[in-house]
Amino acid sequence: MSLLSPVHPAFVSRVEPDSAAAQAGVQAGDALLRVNGNAITDILAYRRELEAGDVTLEMQRVDSSTFEFRVSWEDPGLEFSEVLFDGIKLCANKCEFCYVHQMPKGFRKSLYVMDDDYRLSFLYGSFVTLTNLSEADFDRIISENLSPLYVSVHSTDQALRADMMKWWRLKVKDPESTKIQDTLKRLEPIDLYTQLVLLPSRNDGQYLEESLEYLSSLPNVLSVACVPLGLTDHRRNLPELRPYTAPEAKDVLRIAHKWQKKLLEERGTRFIFPSDEFYILAGEPLPPEEAYEGYPMLENGVGMVRDFLSGELPPLPKAVPGTRVILGTGKLFAPILDLALEPLRAVRGLHIEVRALENKTFGTVTTVAGLLTGRCFLENITPAEADLLIVSPSTLRYGTELMLDDISLTNLREKLKMDVRSGGKNLGELARVILENAQSSLPQFGYSAHAVKERRA
Ligand code: SF4
């Protein structure tokens, strides 16, 4: 890159005190323009430039004035508001099962972004299809060893994959990138976690067998997650698709278990990991913890339930002050949660109800907890019918108390006239949240003495 390359200002969000940047007078809100005269596209390119040592950073202030400072090998002390300075790379496909196409209107803009950016795959583990890669992207992935990457394969049968994903010719920069078998081979130096989004009677059965055979033959493919398609009631002008039936889910598991057995012997890993949803849909028991081999695909719904159940319950008191608790969750997980919380029902004073919430936003076909919105809680729960409502942490935007539709836990508290808490990430944490809240509702006089004695007994 040179001075002629387009500049992508990288806005500074924080400057480390006493760092080279701080000493040079850099402030939050300033922008990095170039490093060693090169335009910088993303945080990875920035780090690569720094690794070369002796760099000059060209900065721009809010008033457009520019200045430079230098570092040798030390970190300049800059943090940026984004990791991608040149914007997010969008997908070149129109997958028939795409969730974005089935989203109701009215959500925040970011939920409609059809990203397919290999840099986010490397940085955060998001899945990419690779059909939008240019020759230069391939070269960069390999030369900078952007490993591992997470790849949506869906099927290794080229014609079937093309039919399912319907990429736009004009958006594909390198036609070779759409040939999945060649692409996976081309990325031979890069470790790949892959996923197959399965559609009933489409890419399962014999196609699934073939995909597993091919993927397991490649040393750089570390595992395959199998997840069923996600549907909403908002599929307008889209191909007709339906959810998995129990016998179909069982068939997927039969194939997966056959390959797991074979590959555990041959490669020392089960290699293929069906998502929790397949087990629940099929009515089959979840595998034990060790079968998930460290949960590398947890974010993809593979092992989430087992991980949740593996949290041990804390010691339970005999009684708490009378507390009515509703745990609102998706229809899929509700029966499992209900069973797991059975020991808490022995605590006198604790009245627990696991409520399977109908998804009022995405429709009845959507049964996972992670897609419940604030509206689902407001329309499935009557104000003041409980003292405490527990919502699954998966319904909240990471690091916030906001749900998908931007309704906050505070909004829920006000409208439902009850305390609202996020449950923990496993059963033990959830039980602690329930008990702490039940015990903190202990009145200061009278009845409390009895409860205290009960707990000590
Ligand atoms: S790759 Fe497919 S599923 Fe992902 S955003 Fe694009 S069209 Fe949707």
Image (cartoon, grey):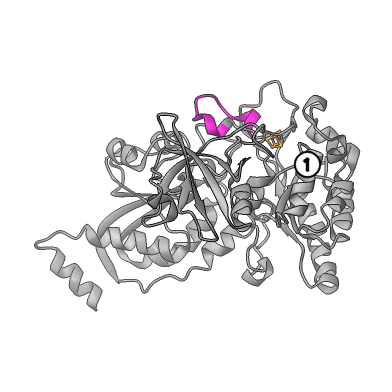
Task: Say left or right for 229 vs 406.
Answer: right
Task: Say left or right for 152 vs 345.
Answer: right
Number of callouts: 1
Residue 51: tell me if it is visible: yes
Residue carrying label 1: 136
Residue 81 belongs to the span the image colors magenta:
no
Q: Quadrant of the C terminus?
A: bottom left
Residue at horizontal 58 percent and vertical 58 percent from the top: 304
133 and 369: which is toward the camera: 133
Furthest-top residue in this view: 237
Q: Secondary structure at mark 1?
A: helix
Task: Say left or right for 255 vs 394.
Answer: right
**What amino acid is found at the position of numbered circle 1 in the picture?**
Ala
Residue 152: tell me if it is visible: no
284 and 26: which is toward the camera: 26
286 and 97: which is toward the camera: 97
The percent position of residue 399, horizontal first and vertical second, equals 43, 49
| Pointer 1 local density, CA inside 10 Å: few below 14, some 14–19, many at least 20 | few
Q: Is residue 178 above or below residue 419?
A: above
Q: Is residue 347 above or below residue 399?
A: below
The percent position of residue 34, horizontal first and vertical second, equals 57, 40
Residue 101 belongs to the span the image colors magenta:
yes
> Can you tell which quarter of the image residue 377 is in?
top left
Q: Which residues are magenta?
A: 100-111
> Can you tell which quarter of the image residue 90 is in?
top right
Residue at horizontal 83 percent and vertical 27 percent from the top: 169
Furthest-bottom residue in this view: 457
The percent position of residue 320, horizontal first and vertical second, equals 26, 64
